[in-house]
Image (cartoon, grey):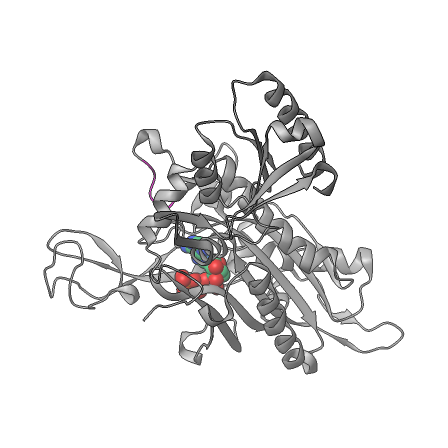
Amino acid sequence: MWYNERHMSKNVKLEDIVSLSKRRGFIFPGSDVYGGLSGTWDYGPLGVQLKRNVMQLWWKMFVDERDDMYGVDAAILMNKKVWEASGHVATFTDPLVECSNCHARHRADKLEDANKCPTCGQTGTFGEPRAFNMMFKTNVGPVADENSISYLRPETAQGVFTNYKNVVDTFYPDLPFGIAQQGKGFRNEISPRDFIFRDREFEMMEIEYFVHPDMWQEAFDHWVEQSKKWFEALGLPADMVHELEVPEDDRAHYSKRTIDFEFDFPIGREELMGLAYRTDFDLKNIQDHSGKNMEYQVKGTNDKFIPHVIEPSFGVERALMAVLTAAYTEDEVNGEKRVFLKLPEHLAPVKYSVSPLLKNKPELVEKAREVYAALKKKYGAVMWDDNGNIGKRYRRQDEIGTPHVVVIDFQTLEDGTVTVRDRDTTEQQRVTLEAI
Ligand code: ATP
């Protein structure tokens, strides 16, 4: 059963997160005015900031702060040979069943009861599952024929593998080294569901870490540790994250070892990210299909081999959903229920909000504008918020996870101090303007 003692409310419900996300301008259903498009979501002003903070933190930790990592940004549309060589055209499939009664289609391996249609409730109406390829197919250029077929990438990894040689030939990195990429991935999921958990368009952050074949285990352990550091930086309580050693039968075709990191989402314990040992599968395939040599030569030696790969694969939406789940908190303030997002400060979309105590006092407004401008210059993510009374402003900022609310009052005009209210404790402190 799902339980986390950090929360004053014991059970975070998915509806609460979905409703707060919409109400406060984080995440909206995609194409909402036209009734939506299943499996797509749009990020509002706060959502895009939160998402960027997550992605930038990842880039900082895994690219900027390391000296063995190279970033790339490959095109989403790639030559179809990429997906033929990688095995995606043949095997990137989920098992699909169709109900003979209501014709609803479902993913066979995700059904609660393999015999019962969740749409109409009939049993025994499914035939044999068939393999449904999840790649979105399109044509590149004005002629729609076999030769112009391409796919929206279902993972960013292939954009890295196809650039492996470019990076080696331009940077001569020593092994082990990694290539990192962030960007959109597209999968025509049979049943997108559970808010942003399973989407048809989503954002990925992937690393392909190239190692000597004898070193894969060491590198794998390294990435287990690094992944845990990442969860910590996201503010996810360690007891809500779980390691699942994926048995051979359930592993992707290319993987010799996989650990799924699972998280206690409101929908239950589900995959947050995956860590896979992909051997030399991808580079070898590229070598075979392209005829280009993918071997790595150790400097100053004749030692040549195709490097093996450890791949930590992070999904941004699942990270966001985990962050929101961990942060969503309810407590009571002065006998009233309060909802707040206990986001780590480095992730909060707004760091400070600023307002005059009373908005009909021009001298307070003027001073508050001055403070706002100075803070905005320094921190960027600063919001002007003078709507409603001060209590309402606190509640609103709590709900969007703003760690500090600065209020300018008459004393500010006299001694240059302001009140700063802390989101988590709700305590107010008088501090000098210089202090913030
Ligand atoms: P699942 O078993 O849940 O379908 P998967 O094993 O197919 O996921 P991977 O191929 O390992 O997922 O993808 C790597 C990561 O990308 C996942 O851990 C997840 O964070 C993210 N991801 C994959 N599919 C989706 C999706 N449809 N929507 C949102 N994120 C996704």
The correct choice, above or below, for 412 with respect to 172 in the image is above
Residue that appears at 61% across and 67% down: 229
Q: Quadrant of residue 117?
A: bottom left
User: For this view, does 315 lie left or right of residue 429?
Assistant: left
Pick the front one: 419 or 423: 419
Q: How many marks?
A: 0
Which span is picked out in magenta? Answer: 36-40
* Residue 374 on image: x %, y %: 71, 31
Pick the front one: 82 or 355: 355
Q: Quadrant of the C terminus?
A: top right
User: For this view, does 88 lie left or right of residue 338?
Assistant: right
Residue 188 visible, this angle: yes
Q: Quadrant of the N terminus?
A: bottom left
The correct choice, above or below, for 234 with respect to 335 in the image is below
Rendering quadrant holding ligand 1: bottom left
* Residue 214 on image: x %, y %: 69, 83
Residue 193 visible, this angle: no
Q: Is 37 one of the magenta-colored residues?
A: yes
The correct choice, above or below, for 193 with respect to 168 in the image is above
Pick the front one: 191 or 212: 191
Magenta portion: prevailing SS class: loop
Residue that appears at 50% across and 74% down: 259
Q: Quadrant of residue 286?
A: bottom right
* Residue 182 on image: x %, y %: 60, 51
* Residue 367 on image: x %, y %: 65, 24
